[in-house]
Image: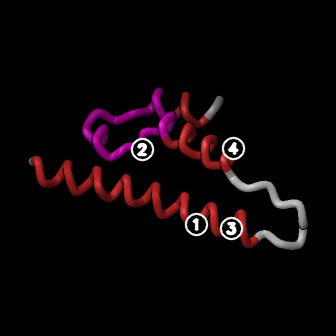
Amino acid sequence: MKFGVHLLANLTPEWNSQYIQYEYMTELLEKAVAAAPIIVDGDNNSASEQYFLRADEDFLEVKITALYHSISIR
């Protein structure tokens, strides 16, 4: 069984607001991998490492902003 299906099948209503949006997260990851620079030199991973560090920072910024807005609204 795939994790996304397992997660949806086992949600607890009381914790619903705390769950990750798994499908959205996997979509973001797939887009990040597709947009990652292709490294011709197999010994130099710095370009792809920097790309994924920026992707991580962007993802966290979106999550933190969403969390801030959800707390501010309540």
Tell me which label, 4 or 2, sits earlier in the chain: 2
In the rendered structure, find residue 34 and report the number of the disc placed on it: 4
In the rendered structure, find residue 49 and report the number of the disc placed on it: 3
Is residue 17 within the magenta segment? Answer: yes
Circle 3/circle 1 CB separation < 8 Å:
yes
Task: Look at mark 2 in the image and give the residue it sits on.
Answer: 20
Q: Residue at x 37, y 53 (%)?
A: 62
> In the image, what residue type sits under mark 1?
Leu
* Residue 38 horizontal/vertical position (percent): 79, 55
Q: In this view, does 74 lie to the left or right of 1?
A: left
Task: Look at mark 1 in the image and give the residue it sits on.
Answer: 53
Which secondary structure dominates the residues rendered in magenta?
helix
* Residue 63 horizontal/vertical position (percent): 36, 53
Q: Is residue 14 left or right of residue 57?
A: left
Circle 4/circle 3 CB separation < 8 Å:
no
Residue 50 image-quadrant placement: bottom right
Give me the C-alpha separation between circle 4 and circle 2. 22 Å
Residue 16 image-quadrant placement: top left
